[in-house]
Amino acid sequence: MKKKNVFASLGKAFGYMKSKIPMILFAMVLAVCGAVLTIIGPSQIGEITNRMQEGLYGNMDLNAICKTGIFLIVIYAASAMFTFTQHFIMATITLDTSKRMRGDLIQKINRVPMSYFNRTSQGDVLSRITNDVQTLQQGLSNSMPNIITAGAQFFGCLVMMFVTEWRLAVCVLAVTFFGMALLMQVMGRSQKYFIAQQENIGNLNGYVEEMYSGHEVLRISRAGEKVNRRFKELNQAVYDSNWKSQFLSGVMQPMMTVMGNIGYAVVCVVGAILTMNGTIPFGVIISFILYVRLFTAPLTQIAQGMTNLQAAAASANRIFKLLETDKLSDETDKTAVLPTASGSVQFDHVHFSYPESPDKVIIKDFTAQIHPGQKVAIVGPTGAGKTTMVNLLMRFFELNSGSISIDGVPTTQLKRENIHNLFSMVLQDTWLFEGTVRENLVYNMEGISDDDLERVCKACGLSHFIHSLPDGFDTELSDSTTISAGQKQLLTIARAMLQNSPMLILDEATSSVDTRTEIVIQKAMDALTEGRTSFVIAHRLSTIKNADLILVMKDGDVIESGSHDELMAQHGFYCDLYNSQFDQAV
């Protein structure tokens, strides 16, 4: 069943080329023409041999031999031209297919639920877009023209052999079919190793990407030996599946070579007997020796092509698993629009559990009313559900029950893009890409002037740092540019300030900065959040003392709420949490 699914995926890859069917048919016609012209050659060479044999006992007709020779040159040149053209057409079509497939994969990544990335490593996703698409493209590009040409040549030779001498044709066919039976057995055994090969490469890429992104922690933890051990296991798995698949597929070509050599021997022995009996002329043996080469060569090409197609089929299977993953629900029917928002947010009896663990409830009956312009802090121990609440607010995940409303409009009635436009977001994990400082700050924004950049950077305490760079805002940020973790976080905060959205989410936004910088950022945030509803997740409770409303979460429930002074006066869980920070400091 697994093999059927794999080759069904290869059929879907061919479906990508349905708009190119006329060109594919034209290439097939060229392939057939090239093969037909090639298989005409042996009969003409046999004719030349017969004329030369006749010349041994009389006058040799050199004029007829020259004409036949010129005819051979013409048909072989035409065959080469047809073959080159069809290879060029098929290569162009498969390149275009892989280009569109990569585009579809990128679009799909933007449409799959966040839960997909919770169960699939980044390296494995990247491997599907790069390695698997490349393997599929090479498999189709190299295999299809060869299989088309070889198939036409195979059947053409079969017809010509029966036309020339049916007894010799039967002998060659018997040997060939025996070889094909062995070939099919080898292919059946090797397919599972090609599937494992692509899966193991994806696992290895995912592990390497994961370890490289955290190589500082890896070194500090002195886990190099453990990582190397795991890498060797994954690398060995790739080696084993590669070795087995290549070994079995490598048997195909020498096997067909042996069958071809046996065919030569059969033709020579049987042909010699028929010639001695006067049944056939000597030229027929020469023609048949060439036909055996032309008849077995396509089988070798088909065997090699099928090897490539097996790897391509395994890659196609992984690609279409991603392309056919359930995507986010269609929202074209939603007409509610909030071009801006005053910032009123209501959580009404929200229940949520992650799709991977439906029995483990993360948010239990969460209810809260957030008024416009309020600065809301969400605090609590690790695993209380703080970040989950923000993810639900942004509709990265769908609720199990209950509702979340913005300005009285349930978020389920709004398109996700509309909700995302209402928020600026700063995460604990900073994200900067290779480009200039300016490009990183104004990412996906238009109409941002230099004055806007200067104002925001000054408010964030970035002005001195940026002007100390060689080219200021036009300095390229890359691996060679030394930027501290705090400076990276300041850049992402400045980016959020430039977005100027009506609501703001800060998820541990000041966790990577020192106390002095934190004070600067706090002043900037106070100015930024003025008149805007903001949600702040923080473990350092000293940073949210001035919040209008503090929601204290524990085990998915809001157990306390109020201002800092009100919660401290209650001497409850928040008070213990707040005081514990100073106990730890001591």
Image: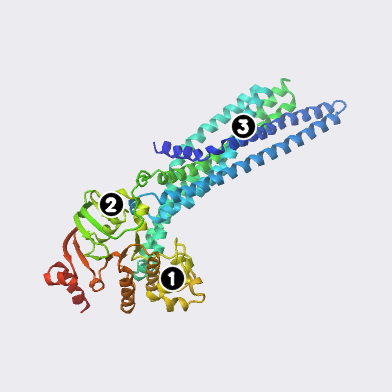
Dot 1 falls on a residue whose secondary structure is helix
Task: Single out the mark in the foreground, 3 or 1.
Answer: 1
Label whose residue precedes the other's in the sequence (3 or 1) = 3
Please name whichever residue, 92 or 527, is drawn nearer the observer in this view of the structure.
527
Which amino acid is tagged 3?
Answer: Ala
Q: Is residue 441 above or below residue 138?
A: below
Name the residue carrying label 1. Answer: 452
Dot 2 falls on a residue whose secondary structure is strand
Whether residue 473 is visible to the viewer of this picture, yes or no, is yes
Residue that badge 3 annotates: 152
Q: Up-down: is 375 above or below 91?
A: below
Q: Residue at x 30, y 57 (%)?
A: 391
Residue 218: horizontal and vertical position, in percent? 36, 67
Real-space Cα distance between discs 2 and 1? 32 Å
Residue 409 marker: 2
Element type at mark 3: helix
Q: What percent of the width, then of the height, locates residue 300?
A: 58, 38
Quadrant location of residue 522? Answer: bottom left
Does residue 419 appear left or right of residue 561 in this picture? right
Q: How many marks?
A: 3
The residue at 54%/42% (across/down) is 140
Q: Is the residue marked by circle 1 packed among few (<14), some (14-19), or many (20+) residues within 10 Å? A: few
- Whole-angstrom CA distance, mark 3 to mark 1, is 68 Å
Q: CA distance from mark 2 to mark 3?
A: 65 Å
Q: Quadrant of the N terminus?
A: top left
**Direction from residue 576 to residue 444 in the image, left or right:** right
Q: Amino acid at mark 2?
A: Val
Query: What amino acid is labelled 1 in the image?
Result: Asp
Colour pattern of the rendering? rainbow
Q: Few, some or many C-alpha atoms within 10 Å of disc 2 (few <14, some 14-19, many ≥20)?
A: some
- Residue 327 locus on image (x, y percent): 37, 46
